């Protein structure tokens, strides 16, 4: 055990860097970009935490991880305690450490960020999460005695997995229903291997299965079973089926061959391993010039995937500027390093094709920024007469998703908002007693960590509901 | 925890169409006419949509009818009884819009006949009079004749006249529409066949339902790869269909989008043939698209 440093000594330590694969090497492979911190470096970074009495970082975290606590254990070299503390607050730290937008959540609140760089909370979370995976025997979930209550969870994405872990911890008998053939939801079909290796998701799923969580794949709630059937067979239900329906741009030419939704493009490459074609059976079109429309994480993932699939030019087409890009800062930075081109202040007006109906270009109009809109961001306004064509052979549309009506349309009693998202109360409960919901099906397209936050708080509310001796609805 | 789907019976229906009866108890219990499943044979395999041709809740089995044209479908029909399919998800898509009374004309081209079968079955169960017209290139390519005969009158057409009426199903359909009042037409087969049927019924204002089988990945509305244009609007065949009002379908777009992966399919097939995975199959019909669209690509009318 090391001796405690003084604040002055802590302030003298510079933020540690995480090593990465070199940009021009990694943009041709699907291996993880970030290589993680060595233990020595992680411990040094942990020493940078000032252990604030009133830690602001915690309130910046959607699942309220007790950040100073796990970092303190880490700085003392007590890895097992650090892991226990972190896992108690956050069931999936190896995942959130990689995909959370720390710069707008915990790290933006870090007091050290006021003068210099904040503590690299995300790096440390990832380090401890990965350590815990490597020492899983010591980190098995502690579960309460069986409660005798059965819970169904719809969807095995971040919201569903988090809720499952919490509910299992409370002693409930949990079954997750997944529509696809593999568990993980967006963590396996959406987020690419180079950002979140699938073996991490598998390990988290295995950890849940070890404590008795059952995961039933190939089961589409709304089709294979109705929500009503789940309500009859289980004491409570948590719906976390995501916002699965891709939005298109509604411009001419969008059904030409070579136009993909980001969902389809990423699903083919990630879930179906199209990058290994013909070793894997599912193909994906390869292009020389690929234009991805959108500025979020999904757009960055698509553009970077396209580069790795061999595109000579992979570009992001975004109607605002660099400053407004909604993607995580690190993803934008990595994309730039990997040679992704950015076309700012342009919006597509049509997809252009040849006589064989293959995409040959994306017709765009230039934009200028006007007054802030309802989202608080400057509204892009088209500049008349500024149309031009970006030559390309593939267009990937990454402008968001809508609520998938597959489940909700088969359950008319479930109250929805005008976008088709499920309405919940402050406990995450829907208009149906004992049916809770969270993640993108409630929020519209949001983030992994917000879905996890919903899973965690809904699990707590469901536990109270189940302990309250509520009868089956 | 994935349920493995044991194959309980395998029957060769035509030179390249195979029937597999597969354990899928839940789907067998609740499937309705017009619905499909997504099938993934094993690790690394594609997810392919297949219409549920029949099902028996008592035995817990469903019937899949597969035209082996590409690598994925060939490997699927290479499976033998007691072997298993790793993943089957469903039933997916909206059930067929059925009429309650009257007379229905069910037209099946090639392997599409297997898709027409559950529709005819459901209509018959409701007491609707069912007239079926089914076709194939020659006698050996005609499937589900016996099953459909149990549900009503059947006219068989062959392109070469080797069996039944000489000619296309559309010729027989034309006569049937002239001979008696038809309340609704259900047409499933190759895209050119469905288009020809729709062109026949449009001037007669006879409602015509077609079942579309574009390229799909997930089958639950997530990828949007299966988009089709219906009445000028983009629809996802997996969640909005797979059956649509044929008079509103843009068949050119469907036909064109089905060719998206042709190069890949040929590459996969070549690799597959090199590895001699073509178990017990006849030659691929000339002009058929291997791979992604097993249901709509029989050669009979191309």
Image: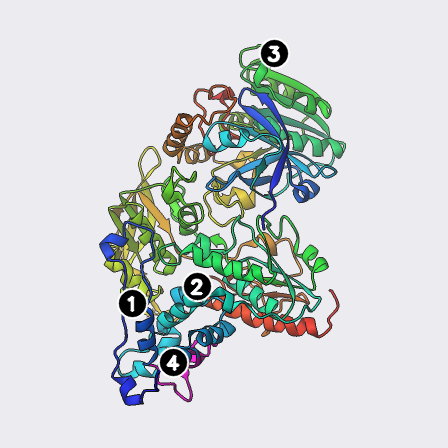
Q: Name the residue that disc number 4 marks.
A: A76
Position above or below: A26 against B235: below
Q: Is residue A387 left or right of residue A453?
A: left
Name the residue at 57% across, 38% down: B85
Which residues fall within the magenta stretch? A48-69
Q: Which residue is mark 3?
A: B163
| Chain that bears disc 2 | A
Q: CB under 8 Å between callouts 1 and 2?
A: no
Q: Is residue A249 above or below residue B132?
A: below
Q: Is residue B284 above or below residue A348?
A: above
Residues tagged by mark 1 and mark 3 found on one chain of the structure: no
Residue identifier under label 1: A18
User: Which residue is under mark 2?
Assistant: A134
Provide the chain ID for the residue under circle 3. B
Residue A149 position within the rendered picture, expressed as x and y whole percent measured from the top left: 69, 66
Which percent across, then down, holds residue A268? 42, 46
How much space separates mark 1 and mark 3, taking CA atoms? 73 Å
Q: Confirm or deny contact between disc 4 and disc 2 (CB under 8 A).
A: no
* Secondary structure found at label 2: helix
Instruction: Look at discs 3 and 2 and give the one toward the viewer.
Output: 2
| Side of B102 where B222 appears, left or right | left
């Amino acid at each position: 055990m090391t001796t405690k440093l003084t604040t002055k000594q802590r302030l003298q330590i510079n933020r540690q860097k995480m090593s990465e694969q070199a940009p021009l090497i990694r943009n041709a492979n699907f291996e993880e970009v970030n290589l993680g911190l060595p233990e020595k470096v992680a411990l040094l970074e942990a020493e940078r935490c000032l252990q604030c009495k009133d830690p602001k970082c915690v309130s910046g975290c959607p699942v309220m991880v007790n950040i100073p606590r796990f970092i303190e254990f880490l700085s003392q070299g007590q890895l097992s305690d650090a892991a226990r503390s972190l896992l108690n607050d956050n069931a999936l730290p190896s995942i959130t450490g990689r995909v959370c937008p720390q710069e707008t959540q915990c790290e933006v609140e870090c007091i050290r960020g006021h003068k210099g760089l904040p503590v690299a909370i995300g790096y440390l979370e990832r380090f401890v999460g990965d350590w815990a995976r490597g020492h899983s025997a010591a980190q098995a979930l502690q579960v309460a005695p069986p409660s005798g209550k059965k819970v169904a969870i719809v969807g095995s994405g971040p919201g569903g997995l988090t809720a499952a872990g919490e509910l299992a911890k409370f002693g409930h008998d949990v079954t997750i229903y997944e529509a696809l053939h593999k568990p993980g939801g967006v963590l396996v079909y959406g987020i690419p291997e180079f950002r979140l290796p699938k073996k991490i998701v598998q390990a988290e799923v295995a950890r849940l299965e070890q404590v008795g969580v059952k995961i039933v794949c190939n089961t589409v709630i709304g089709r294979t079973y109705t929500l009503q059937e789940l309500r009859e067979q289980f004491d409570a239900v948590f719906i976390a089926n995501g916002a699965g329906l891709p939005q298109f741009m509604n411009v001419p030419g969008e059904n030409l061959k070579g136009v993909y939704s980001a969902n389809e493009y990423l699903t083919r490459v990630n879930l179906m391993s199209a990058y290994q074609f013909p070793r894997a059976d599912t193909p994906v079109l390869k292009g020389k010039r690929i234009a991805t429309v959108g500025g979020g994480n999904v757009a960055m993932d698509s553009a970077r995937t396209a580069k790795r699939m061999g595109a000579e030019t992979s570009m992001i087409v975004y109607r605002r500027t660099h400053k407004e890009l909604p993607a995580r800062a690190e993803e934008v930075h990595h994309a730039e390093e990997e040679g992704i081109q950015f076309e700012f202040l342009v919006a597509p007006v049509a997809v252009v094709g040849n006589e064989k109906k293959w995409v040959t270009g994306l017709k765009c109009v230039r934009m200028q920024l006007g007054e802030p809109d309802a989202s608080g961001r400057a509204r892009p306004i088209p500049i008349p007469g500024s149309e031009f064509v970006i030559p390309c052979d593939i267009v990937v549309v990454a402008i968001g998703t809508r609520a998938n009506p597959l489940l909700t349309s088969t359950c008319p009693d479930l109250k929805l908002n005008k976008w088709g998202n499920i309405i919940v109360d402050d406990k995450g409960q829907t208009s149906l007693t004992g049916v809770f919901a969270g993640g993108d099906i409630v929020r519209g397209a949001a983030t992994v960590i917000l879905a996890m936050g919903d899973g965690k708080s809904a699990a707590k509310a469901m536990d109270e509901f189940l302990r309250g001796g509520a009868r089956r609805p | 925890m994935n349920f493995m789907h044991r194959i309980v019976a395998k029957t060769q229906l035509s030179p390249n169409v195979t029937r597999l009866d597969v354990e899928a108890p839940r789907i067998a219990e609740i499937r309705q006419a017009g619905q499909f499943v997504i099938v993934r044979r094993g690790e690394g395999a594609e997810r392919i949509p297949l219409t549920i041709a029949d099902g028996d809740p008592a035995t817990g089995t469903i019937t899949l009818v597969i035209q082996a044209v590409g690598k994925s479908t060939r490997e699927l029909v290479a499976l033998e009884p007691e072997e298993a399919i790793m993943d089957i998800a469903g039933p997916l898509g909206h059930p067929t819009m059925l009429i309650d009374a009257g007379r229905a004309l069910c037209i099946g081209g090639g392997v599409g006949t297997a898709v027409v079968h559950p529709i005819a079955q459901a209509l018959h169960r409701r007491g609707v009079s069912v007239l079926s017209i089914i076709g194939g290139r020659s006698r050996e390519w005609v499937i589900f004749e016996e099953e459909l005969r149990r549900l009503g009158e059947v006219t068989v057409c062959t392109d070469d006249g080797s069996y039944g009426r000489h000619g296309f199903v559309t010729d027989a359909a034309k006569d049937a529409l002239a001979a008696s009042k038809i309340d609704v037409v259900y047409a499933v087969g190759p895209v050119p066949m469905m288009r020809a049927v729709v062109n026949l019924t449009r001037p007669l204002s006879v409602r015509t339902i077609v079942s579309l089988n574009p390229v799909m990945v997930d089958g639950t509305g997530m990828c949007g790869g299966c988009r089709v244009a219906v009445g000028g609007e983009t629809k996802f065949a997996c969640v909005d269909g797979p059956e649509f009002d044929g008079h509103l379908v843009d068949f050119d777009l469907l036909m064109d989008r089905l060719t998206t992966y042709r190069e890949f399919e040929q590459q996969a097939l070549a690799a597959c043939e090199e590895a001699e995975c073509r178990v017990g199959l006849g030659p691929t019909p000339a002009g058929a698209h291997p791979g992604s669209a097993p249901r709509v690509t029989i050669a009979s009318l191309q």
